[in-house]
Every structure is written in structure tokens, then in C-alpha cells.
Image (spheres, helix red, strand yellow):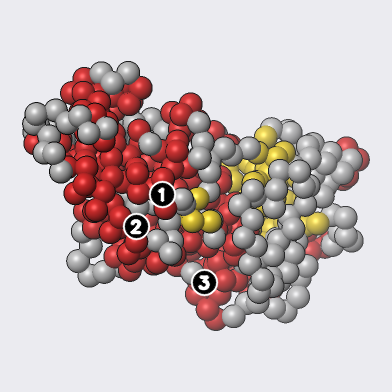
Amino acid sequence: MSSNNHCSQVDTNTSYTIAIQPIVDAQLCHVADELLYRANQSTHVANVVDDVQATARACAVAVYEIGLEKLCGSRQLFINASEAWLTNPDLTNLPSKQVVIEILENTPPTDDVLKALQAIKNLGYKLALDDFVLNSENQAFLPFCDIVKFDISLQVPEELIKTLLNDGFILLAERVETQDEFEYCKALGFTLFQGYFYERPQPQTSHSARRSASRANQMQLLSTLYSDNVKLADIGSLVARDPYLLHAIFKRANSAEKGSRHPISKLIDCLQILGLRELRTLVAIVMLAGNSPVSKLNLTKGLTRAFACEAVAKLRQLDEQEGFIVGLFSLMPAILGVSEELVADEIELGQPIEAAIKQRSGSLGQLLNDVESAEAQFSPQDIPADLILHSAAKARSLVDNHLS
């Protein structure tokens, strides 16, 4: 189902969410879902201001906030893609085994679009053609498509349907409202069905607070991701300034699709698991979603503690990155403006780090206690008296230089 037409005004609201509508087979088995953008949780329509931003927000919620395994299990997820989305290579590294990309009916078959479709096919995606009405232009899309969708509230072209079936296309009937319509489409040869006869779109709730670092920081991160000599340490330092990105990266790296048997608790490991292509997609999607800036004050406090914990970890010959993560995530609820329980539910950091933050147990828990004592000007003997001052200066420098 297509969204409203693109226009230049950008929606800055961050209360948006998604809905998913089931897609079933001829035996009424729920085999896939269509991802639908919703401007807020109370609306039942898309209210799209910008096609690309709407898809970016929907993908960010589905993949990086809720997570595909929680949202739709192993079922396929159909995602609307406009011309600008299709032709942006940064946006084509979503999970190709699970995501079906829908070409919207108003997409022009330009040379750039057709080249992009071939590249997308080469990456392993299935492509669907939305609301298909045969004409001389959209016929050019057929060689790239696996699935053709028909809006059966319009006149059903039975001869064209026979031709497409003979050519091996999978046909999906959408806007199927009644059991009689389902039986009619099934008799014509449709094998996938979507509509109110089975279920209305179901709104989904995400509790993530969408406060992201500045565009300057994100642009610097994108340029770093594309530099000739990419260093994960440089990427990590930029990611650490952006709570939403950090949250998304940890959640994605620990997703079922990535197949880790144990929680990944080091940022460097998360970055390695995702790889440059997916990191570029993740950052581009978050930038396009246009979330509001995080609180400078709370981010500065979080980074100050993170840098202090990192420094003390080095003094005590502990893992410095684990020290940084313990420090930052101990204040993540305040940075994101959500509850401790929600952060704990959203991300598994591994037993040692979680125990350090919650129970202050183990060497990392002692480290966190000692840094908090230093913040209160009661520094343990092995912590330099000026540690918090130096850490705060480093945090302020990062925030002032990279947050607008």
C-alpha cells in the first residue's frame, strides 16, 4: 500500500510508531507482514509528510528499536520504498533474507532506478511491485520482481493475472475485505492475501526515546565510515556520543539474526558483527528519521562518568571498553529519559556488566562505586584527584564540538 505523495516539508514529531498488517497464504497461514508508518499511536493512517523519512522511521522502529525477531519472528516483512530510497545505496543493507522491498506504484522506471533494482536483486532481496496496473512504463519493472500486488478494490484484470501466473510471478491480493473476495482471488490463482477479511493493521509500541546526537556528529560518523582507512576505534568514539545509535547498535548486534550465543557487551565487537555496510545503513536511517537532539547536560554527565570509568579500568588493568560501557549505561536511563527497567529489557549487556550496574558486584561494580565516590569528591587512593575534572573536560569538548 503506498503512502501519500512526497512533499518537501519534514515532520519533526518523534512520537511516530508503526503498524503491521498480516499477509496470509491460501491456507490462511500468516506468512508475512507489511510494515506501515504511523505518525503517532492514535492514528490509523500514515499521514506521511516525506516518503523517505516515513520509511526510515518505520525501518528504525522495526529493525533497531523493536527488533525483527520480536516484531515478526521469521516471517518476511514488506517495506515500501520510494524512488529516492531505492537509489540510495546506503539504505539497502537491511536483512535481505527477511525484508521484501515494495516498489511504489508512482516510481518512474528511470535508468537509475532500474540499475538500482538490479543491484538490490544482486544483494539477495525479493522485490514486490505495489498496486500493479500494467502500462508501458511499469512493465519495465517486471523482470526484477518476484511478487506482484493487485488492489482488488479496483477492477481485477483477469487476463493479465493469467499471463503473470504463466510467467511465474507470485501474486498478492490486497484490500481483500470479505471471505467471498478471498475465495474469488484464490480461484484466480493468487497465493498471498492481505486485507481486513483477515486482520486490520496492528499498531506496535516502541518505548525507545528518540533523542539522537546532532547531525554534525552523524555526518562525521558517516564520513568516517566511508574513509579510506576506516578504524573501528574512531567509529566507536563517534557512536559513543549518540545514545540512540549506541542503543540501536547493541540491540542489532545482539539480535537473534546475528546468531551470538552470548550477549555482546563490547562496542568494538558490536561494530565488527554489524560490519561497515550495515553500519552505514543504520546511520543513514537514523539520520533520515530526523530525531530530536539529546540533552547536552545529561549526555555530558554520562560521557564524564564513562571516560572516568574507562581511565580507572586502565589503571586497574581491567577492560577499558567494558569500563566505558558500564559508566555510560549506568546513566543511560537519564540520557534517554526512560526507566532503568526499560533499558534493561531492551539491551542485554552480559551478566558482568549488568551485575556491575544493578548490584555493583564484581570488579566492574567496585569500579563504578569508586567513580561515583570520586564524583562526590571522595576519591579512593588509586584514583587521581583530578580524574573527574579531566573526564568532564573531555566530555564537554566532545559535546560542545559535535552537538549543535
Give the label, 2 or 1, closer to the camera. Answer: 1
Give the label, 1 or 3, closer to the camera. Answer: 1
Who is closer to the viewer here, 275 or 365? 365
Instruction: Report which residue position mark 2 lands on.
Output: 399
Q: Is residue 55 above or below residue 347?
A: below
Residue found at the far front of this picture: 377
Marks 1/3: CA–CA distance: 38 Å
What residue appears at the point 38 percent right and 36 percent down from the top-left corner?
331
Residue 129: x %, y % from top left? 67, 62
Sequence-wise first label, 2 or 1: 1
Query: How dense is the environment of label 1, judged by Cα within 10 Å: few (below 14), some, or many (20 and up)?
Result: few
Marks 2/3: CA–CA distance: 33 Å
What residue appears at the point 8 percent right and 31 percent down from the top-left corner?
382
The quadrant where residue 80 appears: bottom right
Who is closer to the viewer here, 393 or 63? 393
Residue 172: x %, y % from top left? 72, 51
Type of residue at label 3? Thr
The quadrant where residue 30 appears: top right
Q: Is residue 35 above or below residue 2?
A: above
Q: Is residue 36 visible?
A: no
Residue 297 disc label: 1
Residue 87 disc label: 3
Who is closer to the viewer here, 331 or 138? 331
Type of residue at label 1? Leu
Quadrant position of the C terminus in the picture? bottom left
SS category of the residue bearing label 2: helix
Marks 2/1: CA–CA distance: 9 Å
Q: Taking 391 as reference, is 89 left or right?
A: right
Q: Is residue 75 above or below residue 189?
A: above
